[in-house]
């Protein structure tokens, strides 16, 4: 390759995020997902605060988180198999419609003066089922909408829109929750799914190629077979599982951290802004992967970001006043999503498109599916000890994973 070619390739990579947005179908799906994501994060932050205010129980907050994310453990493999076998566009339309209906159901349940805890969990579980089937399909669809050399930009933008929604959604949700109550927030989220559904109608992604491989159980577990024989894939997934179980408890237990350590009521604008700072940091970390660090070696970057996350999380655990918590929450979000986006991009660039849906199903299980197990475990521990103890052991595990996450060595095996 000539020097001019190398410089041209570097320029293309550094502009990958902007170039990906010029691709019509990616731009449409990205915009619809962003609008819908704002509603999703309005609901997520309001749900945690609503449940905590209703019960004053970190354990019940954990149950709610498990109901929402637990289905990923059982159904992500099915979602990944379907993503590689059926029309992804049609599957996304079905799952998005199901989640919209479940959000409206949650709004009805929450509208009662003393809502049934069982009905609340069932409605949240219904949202989780749709998300478990939707997630692997969405992850597999995005790389098919842009050329391969723009993949890092598309993935970073996909992470960025999800986390920009994490900034805007909590701020709006915090205002609406304090003003009109949780039920209206959940209903508004249900309406925002229409943006995503419309954007899916407007695109025409290429369908998965004809299936000539194994069928039945072997096809369902095809992603596991890839992880077993590929050290690079295996190390990323092991890292993700351990990080999700031990270190990402802080996301679901943010209301507990705010109340116990910082003296912030979960039903307040101050808490919504704290969550928004975390989300703004996450957006910045995700965007940096496709812009500032587009030419960086993501295998090295993921390791450094993990170490920074460990330090930031430990700092958040030790704070006792709100003012410094806002910039620290930004740093937690920045380092967390820099790590996740680096790993996600590296994985998607590495795996073959024919098995991407099933491998990304394992990603969804490791990330979203393992978090509720960690939260369920942490709930009683928080009540027996403190939220500080749980955040600190999460920081220690993240530090150990920064040592383990030697992807260059794994790729050379």
Image (spheres, rainbow, N blue to C red):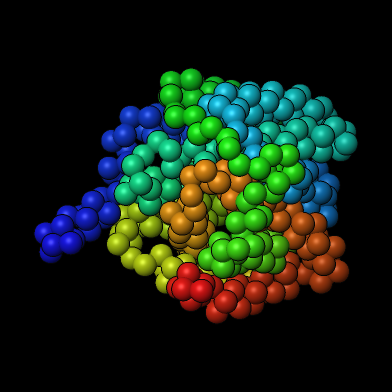
Using the rendered image of the protein, determine whether residue 215 is visible from the camera's viewpoint.
yes
Q: Position of residue 151 (x, y in %)?
A: 38, 48
Q: Position of residue 413 (x, y in %)?
A: 51, 74
* In the image: residue 50, left or right of residue 208: right
> Which quadrant, please, contains the N terminus?
bottom left
User: For the point 31% across and 55% down, which residue is it?
Assistant: 291
* In the image: residue 343, left or right of residue 214: left
Q: Position of residue 158 (x, y in %)?
A: 45, 44
Q: Which of the 4 image quarters holds residue 10?
A: bottom left
Q: Nearer the viewer, residue 117 or 31?
A: 31
Q: Nearer the viewer, residue 180 or 292?
A: 292
User: For the point 63% across and 51% down, which residue is it?
Assistant: 223
* In the image: residue 188, left or right of residue 115: left
Q: Nearer the viewer, residue 361 or 229?
A: 229
* In the image: residue 174, left or right of residue 326: right
Q: Which of the 4 image quarters holds residue 205?
A: top left
Q: Position of residue 47 (x, y in %)?
A: 70, 41
User: For the point 69% across and 74% down, which residue is it?
Assistant: 393
């Amino acid at each position: 390759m000539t020097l001019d070619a190398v410089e041209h390739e570097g320029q293309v990579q550094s502009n990958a995020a902007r170039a990906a947005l010029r691709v019509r179908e990616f731009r449409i799906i990205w915009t619809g997902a962003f609008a819908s994501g704002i509603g999703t994060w309005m609901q997520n932050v309001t749900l945690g605060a609503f449940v905590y205010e209703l019960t004053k129980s970190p354990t019940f907050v954990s149950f709610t988180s498990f109901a929402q994310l637990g289905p990923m453990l059982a159904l992500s493999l099915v979602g990944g198999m379907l993503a590689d076998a059926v029309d992804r566009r049609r599957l996304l339309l079905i799952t998005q419609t199901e989640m919209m209906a479940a959000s409206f159901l949650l709004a009805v349940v929450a509208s009662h003066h003393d809502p049934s805890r069982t009905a609340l969990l069932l409605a949240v579980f219904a949202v989780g089922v749709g998300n478990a089937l939707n997630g692997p399909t969405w992850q597999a669809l995005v790389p098919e909408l842009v050329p391969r050399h723009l993949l890092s930009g598309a993935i970073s933008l996909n992470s960025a829109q999800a986390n920009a929604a994490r900034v805007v959604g909590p701020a709006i949700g915090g205002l609406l929750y304090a003003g009109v109550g949780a039920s209206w927030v959940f209903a508004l989220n249900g309406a925002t799914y229409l943006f995503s559904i419309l954007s899916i109608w407007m695109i025409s992604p290429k369908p998965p190629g004809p299936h000539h491989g194994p069928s039945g159980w072997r096809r369902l577990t095809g992603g596991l077979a890839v992880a077993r024989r590929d050290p690079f894939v295996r190390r990323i997934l092991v890292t993700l599982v351990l990080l999700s179980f031990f270190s990402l408890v802080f996301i679901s237990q943010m209301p507990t951290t705010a109340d116990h350590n910082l003296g912030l009521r979960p039903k307040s604008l101050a808490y919504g802004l704290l969550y928004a700072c975390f989300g703004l940091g996450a957006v910045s970390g995700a965007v940096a992967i496709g812009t500032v660090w587009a030419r960086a070696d993501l295998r090295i970057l993921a390791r450094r970001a993990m170490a920074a996350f460990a330090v930031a999380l430990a700092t958040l655990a030790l704070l006792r006043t709100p003012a410094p918590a806002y910039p620290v929450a930004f740093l937690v979000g920045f380092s967390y999503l820099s790590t996740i986006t680096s790993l996600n991009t590296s994985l998607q660039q590495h795996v073959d498109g024919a098995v991407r849906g099933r491998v990304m199903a394992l990603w969804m299980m490791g990330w979203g599916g393992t978090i509720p197990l960690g939260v369920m475990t942490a709930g009683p521990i928080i009540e027996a000890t403190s939220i500080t103890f749980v955040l600190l052991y999460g920081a220690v595990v993240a530090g150990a994973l920064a040592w383990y996450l030697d992807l260059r060595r794994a790729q050379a095996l």
